[in-house]
Image (cartoon, rainbow, N blue to C red):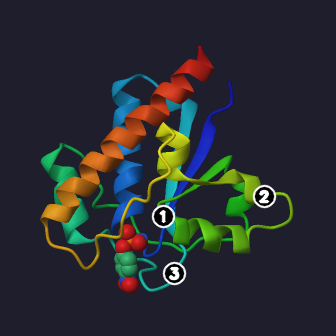
Amino acid sequence: MKPVRLLFVCLGNICRSPLAEGVLRALAEKKGLAPALEVDSAGTGAWHIGDPPDRRSIEAARRHGIDISELRGRQVRPEDFRNFDLIFGMDENNVRTLKRLAPEGAAEKVRLFLDYASGRSEDVPDPYYEGPEAFEALYQMLDAGCSSLLVRFGERAS
Ligand code: 4NP
């Protein structure tokens, strides 16, 4: 079966979406689902192109045994709408921007992450201006969301 190609998108591609990418990849490996998935992340904004993830996201991942330090920021590109099967906005603002950028017919690939993953129409809030505790909460939210996502894909694959 062809792998499902997933793109996580937030504003800067340094806090939420690279952590989501790392968490999903680690969970998929643990569950033997890695060959079924291709995962990437991007930002709607251009401020952090080429930058590593925010140190607080790197540390949150590291506390849970995941290394995201090699990831680098990039901006959403037109071909992403062709190359990915699903494009997950972390919050409603990201979803709105993505739908505006989507070419004809591609807007249905754009989904609010937690809504798709677990049926909860809820944002993954931007932690950039928050304290370090927000990054542990972010990790927990992404871990739960990515686990639900894999249950969905596991059900589909079987
Ligand atoms: P992210 O967080 O969208 O989760 O990566 C942010 C990172 C940087 C900025 C905003 C949000 N910024 O304004 O530079």
Look at 28% across and 70% down and name the residue there: 127
Q: Given the image, on which type of amino acid does mark 1 rest?
A: Asp
Q: Secondary structure at mark 1?
A: loop
Look at 51% across and 84% down and name the residue there: 46
Of mark 1 and mark 3, the one earlier in the sequence is 3
- Dot 3 surroundings within 10 Å: few (below 14), some, or many (20 or more)? some
Q: Which quadrant of the structure image shows residue 112?
A: bottom right
Look at 75% across and 59% down and name the residue there: 107
Position of 128 compared to 147: left or right?
left
Of mark 2 and mark 3, the one earlier in the sequence is 3
Q: Secondary structure at mark 2?
A: loop
How many circles with numbers are drawn on the protein?
Answer: 3
Residue under label 1, please give it: 91
Residue under label 2, please give it: 106
Residue extending farthest bottom? 47
Q: Could you tell me how far apart the alpha carbons at marks 1 and 2 are, in whole angstroms?
A: 18 Å
- Dot 1 surroundings within 10 Å: few (below 14), some, or many (20 or more)? many
Q: Given the image, on which type of amino acid does mark 3 rest?
A: Gly
Q: Given the image, on which type of amino acid does mark 2 rest?
A: Ala
Asked if the residue at label 2 sits under 8 Å from ligand 1, the reply is: no
The picture quadrant for ligand 1 comes to bottom left
Residue extending farthest right? 104
Q: Could you tell me how far apart the alpha carbons at marks 2 and 3 are, in whole angstroms?
A: 20 Å
**Residue 45 numbered tag:** 3
Q: Quadrant of the N terminus?
A: top right
Q: Is 152 in front, or is 13?
A: 152
Of mark 1 and mark 2, the one earlier in the sequence is 1
Q: Compared with residue 146, is residue 79 higher up or lower down, i.e. above or below?
A: below
Asked if the residue at label 3 sits under 8 Å from ligand 1, the reply is: yes
| Any part of residue 67 in sight | no
Q: Which quadrant of the structure image shows residue 57?
A: bottom left
